[in-house]
Amino acid sequence: PAKQSAKDYIFGKVIGEGSFSTVYLAKDIHHSKEYAIKVCEKRHIVKELKVEYVKQEKEVLNILNSNQNKTAPFFVKLYSTFQDNERLYFVLSYAKNGELLPYINKVGSFDIQCTRFYGAEILRALEHLHSLGIIHRDLKPENILLDERMHVQITDFGSAKILDDKPRPQPRRRDGEQSSWQRRNSFVGTAQYVSPELLTEKSVSKSSDLWALGCIIYQMVAGLPPFVARSEYLIFQKIIKLEYEFPDGFEPKAKDLVQKLLVLDSTNRLGAKDIGNYTSVRSHHFFAGLDFETLYKQTPPPIY
Ligand SMILES: NC(=O)Nc1ccc2c(c1)=C(Cc1cc(-c3cccc(C(=O)NCCN4CCCCC4)c3)c[nH]1)C(=O)N=2
């Protein structure tokens, strides 16, 4: 196929802003299909030494594209990439209903049906991602999108880590740019959802995404994340001391599940010792009665 360029698209409104990218709603002029195009300024990512992050995101999206799971298609797709002198372009799925966060803010808190359904879809997405040896590392309601049928589409793999069980030639780096092992020590996700092990040992594992899942389930029920404070430093202090509370009336089964995910020792979190699917999370009584294998075929419960 002919190499694409920005001229093949009509760019519309900005639908997302990252520290190193802007995401536009765009329409393909040949087929009138809508996409989300993530645009990165080359000069900015080079200046901020983020070239490796952009490469990592493309690699993760390509791995996801080549290993699609028909029963758990809970990720944005990468359709194509192209560049011009100033910018890199990633043509991604357009998730018409946007981020999960505005829905939580709009209704204040989800009822248990919604919390169970969306908690289950996020868990299924993590099962697939982790089965490919990929850790998201920045899972949060802003990176959980909702497609036209209100099913989950996880995005933003710029902070993801590919577990290196296969030795690969290290890519040549520009002077001063950090390699992935050096970078690992500098990366921290979004304060409210970052795991204690990342703060104390600079280590990360699949279980770090389970910590973020615990924070997101808490937030769907309570309306706010468990660790909130006036500054990132104070949030980090609360996380490493496991200093959080459940509001009165927090649904008891959801509370028990959150307490089993928000465990300081990453090896003792529910699911941390599971091989393959997170069966010990799936079998928690909060998810009783849910069919995890047909989630994508189900009609999501209304959010109100
Ligand atoms: N960092 C990233 O990788 N960011 C990305 C990547 C891919 C991508 C991405 C972000 C997308 C973000 C997105 C944003 C939106 C959007 C933006 C603004 C408004 C709306 C909107 O009004 N949606 C209707 C639903 N509202 C939501 C709030 C409650 C009332 C109803 C959607 C739709 N999709 C997307 O569709 N595809």
Image: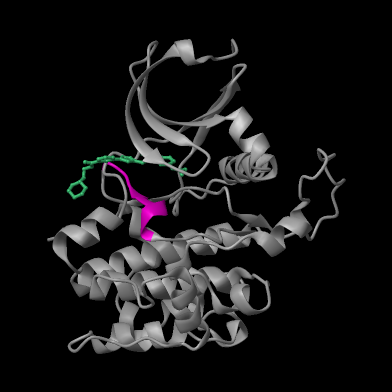
**Left or right: 170, with 259 as reference point:** right
Residue drawn 47% across the image and 59% down it: 125
User: How far across and how far down the image is residue 109, in percent?
Assistant: 19, 69
Residue at image x 77%, y 58%?
182
* Residue at x-position 83% and y-position 40%: 175
Is residue 272 highlighted in magenta?
Answer: no
- Rendered image quadrant of residue 287: bottom left
Q: Quadrant of residue 284?
A: bottom left
The question of residue 144 being in magenta is answered with yes
> Camera-side residue: 10 or 65?
10
**In what quadrant does ligand 1 lie?**
top left
Residue 83 vs residue 69, the one in the foreground: 83
What residue is rendered at 54% in x and 58% in y? 128
- Residue 179: x percent and y percent? 78, 51
Q: Is residue 190 above or below residue 111?
A: above
Relative vertical location of residue 298 with respect to residue 63 in this rendering, above or below: below
For the magenta stretch, what is the residue range? 141-148
Colour scheme of the picture: one colour
